[in-house]
Amino acid sequence: MRFHVLTLFPELIENTFGTSITGRGLESGKLALHTVNIRDYADNRHHKVDDSPYGGGAGLVMQAEPVYRAWESVRRECAGAPRVIYVTPQGHTFRQELARELAREEELIFLCGHYEGIDERVLKEIVTDYISIGDYVLTGGELAALVMMDAIARLVPGVLHNQESAEFESFHNSLLEYPQYSRPETWHEKQVPRELLSGNHKEIEDWRLEQAKKRTRERRPDLYEEYERRQACERQLMKQKLLHTDMLESLRADRGRILHFEEESVALADCEGIFYVTAKDPEAGEKILEKISNNKQKPALLVLHQEFLVERARKLLGPLACERRFPYVYTQKHPLPRCYGAEIRPLTELEDQEREDVAKLVQESGCGQRKKEAFLACFRKGRVYGAFVEGRLRGFMGQNQAGDLDFLYVGELWRRRGIGRALETAWVNQLLGQGARPFVWVEEGEESSRLFQESLGLCRAKSPVWILAKP
């Protein structure tokens, strides 16, 4: 994750972000920070960037041109078009859900205002998100930007030493965090709760859950109401748990926001841009799809769990390519036996030879442009793993944004040696270790894929899903 900050006080950003956990993230390379002094782009010798507001009034306004030039200097360095966040009390409130969404971006640009604000014209031209950290006014946007950057950074994989710290804390699944205790066992005549000293992991987890629920009821009844709604939604989806594994995993990972829930019909908006829909009947489905079509966030991918939803979705959302696939789910709790056909490791920082091997395998696979772009997106987010034999890359796999196994390819000369099995086994066991439920969508008619998944112990859902995307 790379943060770019357009500011009048770069030293404030650098000195603060360079300490503690975020500082360690910079040292490890998991995070990167680039500050840009807006004054460097002023066109006068005094580096003045403000002037009086048209129409009169107190204070000064930051001029459009220096801000625009500063933004242009960053944009030229970026591979794509990063979101530009203007830190302002007039924006929508920053919450943990938004932090999780932003943590999945590769680069973010923060624009920090001062004085009475920034010329509206440049804001309309470059800003994608207006975000506030609360209903109060600060002297500038730097402190608010640092608050957001800290919250986002700790959700980037590898920044925290113990990734569970990011998963099981306040606001996870709409619950506040349970009380924490450390040594000594007795302090000011107050004892550590008996359950935490029992050594019984089930008893400890049950106690923590009850304490989290109790604390949330007392301190944030609004959050507890959302928690109860999520629980009811999960119970509904569990009635066909194989079919709805994708939705259950989106909720478990705290990516999914409940867009609609009533009478056996559920719609989720995943922060990865995926919308999931399961509906009781066509009437309920039409109601949900109309809500999605009117939603500010448009789906990058639409996953439908009933066939009667497909044509209606195309009418409301435009022409969409459609694939019919069956979910295969690993339902066991124990890991698969380790395979020794290859060394499996993440493809992150590649040597020149490894880079050549990746390009060769992608070319050999014959996948189309859309598949290549999806592969590169997975690669940039650290979701691609390689199989190495004799020090050379012989196959790879990737987990897409929905959480399922999307790519699994082994070089032609290296097939039937257990490399594919080693890749998927490593993936399944890794997800189990994270408390996730591994699943794969297999296209109807792909007999070899069906047999392969069944040989690994994955179970097929009785009904398919329909995956819609722009062609």
Image: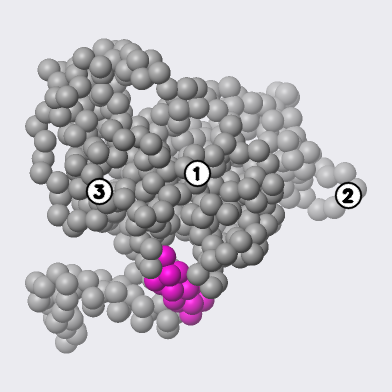
Tags 3 and 1 touching, CB below 8 Å: no
Residue 457 picture location, percent across and down: 20, 48
Residue tagged by mark 3? 458
Question: Which residue, as the protein is rendered here, is positioned at the far right?
Answer: 55
Depth order, front residue of 337/92: 337
Q: Which element is circle 1 on? A: strand
Relative side of 217 to 382, left or right: right
> Of the residues shown, which amino acid type is indicated by label 1?
Ile
Marks counted in the figure total: 3
Main secondary structure type of the part rendered in magenta: helix
Q: Is residue 230 magenta?
A: yes
**Which quarter of the rendered picture does the C terminus lie within?**
top right
Residue tagged by mark 1? 467
Q: Which element is circle 2 on? A: loop
Residue at 14%, 82% in the rendered image: 194
Up the image or down, 443 lies above or below 286; here it is above
Depth-wise, is mark 2 or mark 1 nearer the camera? 1
Q: Start and end of the magenta stretch? A: 220-237
Q: CA distance from mark 2 to mark 1?
A: 55 Å
Residue tagged by mark 2? 56
Tags 2 and 1 touching, CB below 8 Å: no
- Which of disc 1 and disc 2 is earlier in sequence? 2
> Of the residues shown, which amino acid type is indicated by label 2?
Gly
Relative side of 300 to 341, left or right: right
Q: CA distance from mark 3 to mark 2?
A: 69 Å
Residue at 73%, 23% in the rendered image: 43
Residue 150 picture location, percent across and down: 43, 50
- Which of disc 2 and disc 3 is earlier in sequence? 2
Q: CA distance from mark 3 to mark 1?
A: 20 Å
Q: Check disc 1: other Cα within 10 Å, few if <14, some if 14-19, many if 20+.
A: some
